[in-house]
Image (tube, rainbow, N blue to C red):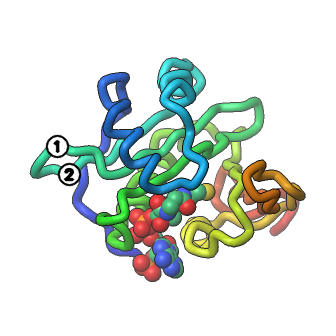
Amino acid sequence: MIARATIEIRKLALHDLDAIERIENAVYPTPWSRSMFAGELAKPSSLSLGGFDPDTGRLVAYLIVSRYVDAWHIMNLAVHPGWRRIGVASRLLDELFELTAGDPRRGYTLEVRVSNTTAIALYETFGFETSGLRRGYYTDNREDALIMWRDPLGHGAVGEA
Ligand SMILES: CC(C)(COP(=O)(O)OP(=O)(O)OC[C@H]1O[C@@H](n2cnc3c(N)ncnc32)[C@H](O)[C@@H]1OP(=O)(O)O)[C@@H](O)C(=O)NCCC(=O)NCCS
């Protein structure tokens, strides 16, 4: 079983944007812009969760999810490099599944770089399975994206037992 870090989780607000940007810029070679985050935070169809250090109140991780007709789409997930491998991302994903549990019509999907074995391993522990490939999806290096899917009950790809 994955250990779960002690963090506080709450919905992100506009006043978290500075902290989000600091983590985003430290984590991704082609980070989202501030306005992309502001747009997601403002959308009623988005679920934006932050994980906070309970001692200092500082943001250590975030998860941005968009609601579509048949799926919750994980748009962004990042954990501060100093807070990794202690179950922070797992806590955020647990919270997502808990908050959306009453929505049996929507599965969960995401794109991930084929080279991002860390994230792929994380998603696999949560029952996501590869359901397709988008060739040259990432514009910075034309890397392919794996499409991953988890059905509403967490039993893997659509159509499988
Ligand atoms: C991917 C990421 C979000 C994982 O966050 P995290 O808080 O460290 O993950 P957790 O501690 O909850 O890990 C849960 C499980 O995922 C897997 N996992 C996480 N990091 C891993 C690693 N470096 N190597 C192998 N497996 C890993 C393991 O199965 C782990 O369980 P275990 O620690 O009991 O073995 C984090 O590494 C990150 O922010 N990476 C950069 C941004 C990114 O790639 N985001 C995803 C884009 S799609």
Q: Residue furthest bottom?
A: 1
Residue at the spot 27% in from the left edge and 64% down from the top edge? 5
Residue at the spot 12% in from the left edge and 47% down from the top edge? 56
Side (left or right) of 54 relative to 62: left
Q: Are marks 2 and 1 in contact (CB under 8 Å)?
A: yes
- Secondary structure, mark 2, is loop
Is residue 54 placed above or below 12 in the rendered structure? below
Can residue 94 be seen in this snapshot? no
* Relative image position of residue 78 (x, y in whole percent): 46, 53
Question: In which quadrant of the rendered view does residue 101 lie?
Answer: top right
Question: In which quadrant of the rendered view does residue 80 lie?
Answer: bottom left
86 or 2: nearer the viewer: 86
Can residue 64 be seen in this snapshot? yes
Q: What label does residue 157 carry, if any?
A: none
* Relative image position of residue 161 (x, y in whole percent): 81, 68
Side (left or right) of 94 relative to 60: right
Question: In which quadrant of the rendered view does residue 119 lie?
Answer: bottom right
Tell me the amino acid under the disc marked 1: Gly
* Relative image position of residue 75 (x, y in whole percent): 61, 43
Tell me the amino acid under the disc marked 2: Asp
According to the picture, the residue beneath numbered tag 1 turns out to be 57
According to the picture, the residue beneath numbered tag 2 turns out to be 53
